Amino acid sequence: MAGSIRGSGIAETAAVLPSPPRVRGRRWTVLRQAARTRLGPLGVVVTLATIAVALLAPAIAPYDPVKQDLGNTLARPDRAHLMGTDNVGRDVLSRMIWGTRVSLMAGFGSVALAVAAGGMLGLLAGYAGGRTDGLVMRLMDAVLSFPPLVLALALGAVLGAGLGGVVIALGVVYTPTFARLMRGQVLTITAREYVEAARALGAPGWRIAWQHVLPNASAPIVIQASLSVAFAILAEASLSFLGLGVQPPGASWGSMINAGRGYLQQAPWIVFWPGAALFVTVVGLNFVGDAVRDALDPRLRT
Amino acid sequence: MRASTPDADIDRRDFLYLCALASGALAPGLSAGTAGAQTAPRKGGTLRVGFYLEASTMDPHLSGSKVDRQIYHNIYEPLLTLDVKLGIKPGLAESWQQPEPKILILKLRQGVKFQDGTDFNAEAVRFNFNRMKTEPKSVRKGEVASIESVDVVDAHTVRLNLRRPDAALLATLTDRAGMMVSPKVAQERGAELERNAKGAGTGPFEFVEWVKDDHLLIKRHDGYWGKQGGPYLDRVRYRPIPDDTVKLQSLQSGEIDVIDYVQPRDVAGVRADRNIVMLDVPSLAAFSYQLNHTRPPFNVKALRQAVAYALDLDQIVKGVWLNVGTPANGPVPPTSWAYDKTIPFIKRDLAKAKAKLAEGGKPSGFAFTITTANIPINVQEAEVIQAQLAEAGMTAKIKLVDAATQLSDGNSKSFDMISYQWSGRPDPDGNIYQFFKTTPGTSLNWSGISNPQIDALLDKTREVSSQAERKKLYSELTKILQDELPMVYIVHPIEPKAMSPKVQGYEPIPDGMMRFKDVWLKA
Amino acid sequence: MGRLVLRRLLATVPVLLLVTAGVFALIHLTPGDPVDVMMAESVDDSVKTTLRRQLGLDQPLYLQYAAWMGKLLRGDLGRSIRNGEPVIENVGRRIRPSLQLAALAMAISLVVATPLGILSAARRNTSVDRFGTTFALFGICMPNFLLALLLIFFFGVKLRWLPISGYLDPFEEGLPGLRSLVLPALTLGLALAAVVTRTLRSSMLDALSEDYVRTARAKGLSESRVIRGHVLKNALIPVVTVLGLQLGTLIGGAVITEYVFALPGVGRLVVDAVFARDYPLVQGVVLLIAIGFILSNLAVDLLYGWIDPRIRHR
């Protein structure tokens, strides 16, 4: 749900329900399956395009995103400014292009943090079992039940309001999801016969983790990650409403929407374009995640 | 109240017309009710008011927030009041005299009762002042610090014995420090008073109920002592609407009747809207930035001056404030009698700025942080300032903080340049003294300035009683402040108020407070 | 069953302990304190010091934590520093609008999502399905403050059909109260509807591929009988799960909606308390929200386990 920072409950339920067995080597089939749905490739294209825009920002932005022009504020889109100017005369298009970097950093950064932290914690819990498992999972439950907005707000006040604070805050908020996911995968996979066999043959824990657990766990994690990146990008936009995130004069799509809120009647383009960018990117990421999930789920293959 | 047209001059003319009518009044708001009105005032109706913040307490002695005052001025009454020109007029005190500089004698109005039925008299006044001085959570202590003791001369005469001459005291008594609370209510209700002020005041309206973050209701006090003019409204309902855009939209859609502030960016649109009446009310407020004198880089005067010369106040007021305000030359606002229009505000001069940089030992510029509150207009202003400073070679980083962090940073002097908004007081003393007087420890003197010349002048402004002389002192102070720069003043904003055309009889007073005594609603 | 519930309840205690430590540490790490905020315009420093001492804010942190925990164990959540009222009363006042908003949002989501989800699954890969999935996708990807903005603009300002700010209790004021909740409930409900549509579609597809459905079809029952009779009941279970999980989030998490529409809900209460550094209020409300979240999760888990025996003993 777009309003909640943590995202829809679907991912949580997915983590709880048992997942069907996987065998390595089907990955290629999976990709081919995903490619067959029309939306998957579209999503990939959109996502890659967004990443490209972010990387090429200095080259493709027509103006300096922070250059003000107080004589030309709230200008309608025209040939000089394809998407108009904002309330201090900055070019909306350039700010949008540079804003891609911020939004993607918020999205990928926080999820990377969450995957790393959550993955490690999940592995630890799954392998160690017993007391450690209990402690780690309790900790994750505690983070999960903490209202995410309050967590982000407080962390923002402690760490400073900039983008770094937001990335860390969102990373913390998403960690339990990945921890649970990883732990679930560890438990399911290590219970399988070939792993039992490997262990009986004397293979050390880390080798099992490397050879069997991680490759098989990667699919659900990738699915979840793609969805979480989408939610993180939306969450960054929501947090900018409360004053967190990139500091001025930098721009993110969320902060542009927020700043433009008061000018909705006079200059709707300030809100419209970053809103559209946000939307398209998030939809694209969702397509990617959905396509991979649909492809991996045998039940829907009829 | 005639509907405003896109021509700004008509607004100003209306306003001045009202001033001309009101200046002859003995009691506040007496004639304003008839100014420009087509029909006689009509009793009845509920006025719905939208504010940006929730009130924090109903006890005027414990209140530290500007929003509270808006309500207080309708249910409580101060000893003295202000007229449209910020002159001091009788309130609950009919007259006053100062036989010596350290004695103030107030003759109280007779026949006034608190809303709970008890009498308003000298005993009550003494009770109130003692409460302000002794109540542990009292925020008024500093404001009445100059009062040593209060004597009851007779049932309707009070003598205030001052510790030292205090020329600003009269103006202080027009606000919360002069507001009289029923002793019976204060004693019986104790801490409950903060949430329930039923019967506690003498004003034209009486507190009814307060549902936090939802609404605050006051109703007409039919036993009000004032027999001329209002109150006419049955009730006034205050609603906190934190989002500016939604607040204005609520007014536009007719859900509320009055809002306390129109953002500069909305002013043009509201002015053109025929369904809304907008009043440009000049205020006492000042927006500025404090510079930290206690640590680098701004412990060096030349660097502070470099900043001042690099700023283009004209551009800021035009581009950010959209001319809803005037560039500031110092802490005294244009609405004040002490305002000296012969002192220009610091004009931009990049050459001088660069020279000052060299003088301060940083010829190629330097970097620092601007800490500012996370409000759209602050953000915009900071961005513009950042660009202006960059042109002079100074690199400013913007740090956005919430209010609590801003206060904490300011109080602990952990900032380079920090934004500061002061809502303003009718007497210049309230806008100046506590910011620039040498004060050890935590205080409102965030910059940490300690200048004996300034200190001496500040003390003198309190001792001297002649307005003309004080004005000269304030002019001198303003010039020194422009040189020493504990604060860089940017703008004295205008605080436009907007209301439905049904609202009649509203008289704006530049202290920004909305008094509804003589307001009535057209059918 | 009773023992299971008790065991699960006891298991939540360590989690709650962690939450108390977390919220206490976090809010005390933020710069500034409530006295600074309350006394912002005060010129007298001694008043602040006295007040801090009265509130116990000058004690070392571990002692303050111990004091708070001591009160907690006696069932006392403390008093808000800003308004002096007990935390529980502050929350009690605000829970009503939040609950009503959540209930209305969930109702809207069910009304929209149920037909859409069923039809999408029943008519898979047709235009209906595509419409349903597209709607679901859009709902999930729309930033909720943007949606609120647009709803206010069209329904409030342009069309003037619905009030855009303020709260009236539907139980006390009837229809006007309901109207005051419609726009915010729509904002939350449409997004929720998107999630529910997806869940319902996916679980319907699951259920439709089960053996007993094939049996029923083979027996000659009409498609709609099949759906109504068996499939729907089972397909609704994950929906209940999702809604249950969302309830926990909606109560404390609809902050932005509450801000934009000026509703006096729990979300705004806690965010304002964070801004004002009102320590007891933040700590108390976060704890209550966490308890609410955990309890609703527990309830959903147990319900799920009870309905679907395959999952019961995980």
Image (cartoon, coloured by chain):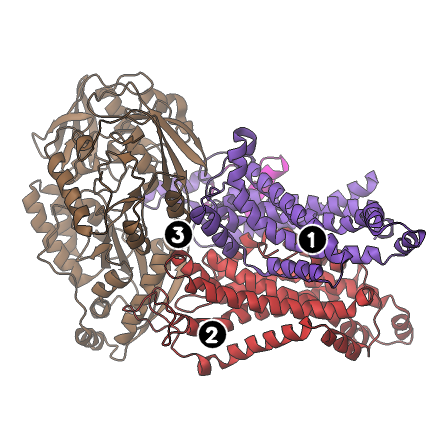
* Chain that is brown in the image: B
Query: Which corner quadrant of the image does residue A247 belong to?
Result: bottom left
Tell me which segment is drawn in magenta: C56-79
Cα distance, mark 1 to mark 2? 36 Å
Q: Chain of mark 2?
A: A
Label placed on residue C116 = 1
Q: Nearer the viewer, mark 1 or mark 2?
A: 1
Marks 1 and 2 on same chain: no
Label 3's element? helix
Is residue B229 one of those drawn in magenta? no
What is the CA distance from the residue labelled 2 to the residue labelled 3?
32 Å
Which dot, 1 or 3, sits closer to the camera? Answer: 1
The residue indicated by pointer 2 is A97
Residue labelled with disc 3: B403
Nearer to us in this view, A182 or B152: A182
Circle 2: residue type: Ile
Q: Colour of chain A?
A: red
**Chain displayed in purple:** C
Q: Locate residue A283, reporting x and y percent.
A: 60, 66
Depth-wise, is mark 2 or mark 3 nearer the camera?
2
Callouts 1 and 3 on one subunit: no
Residue nearer the viewer, A30 or C301: A30
Left or right for A155, reference C197: left
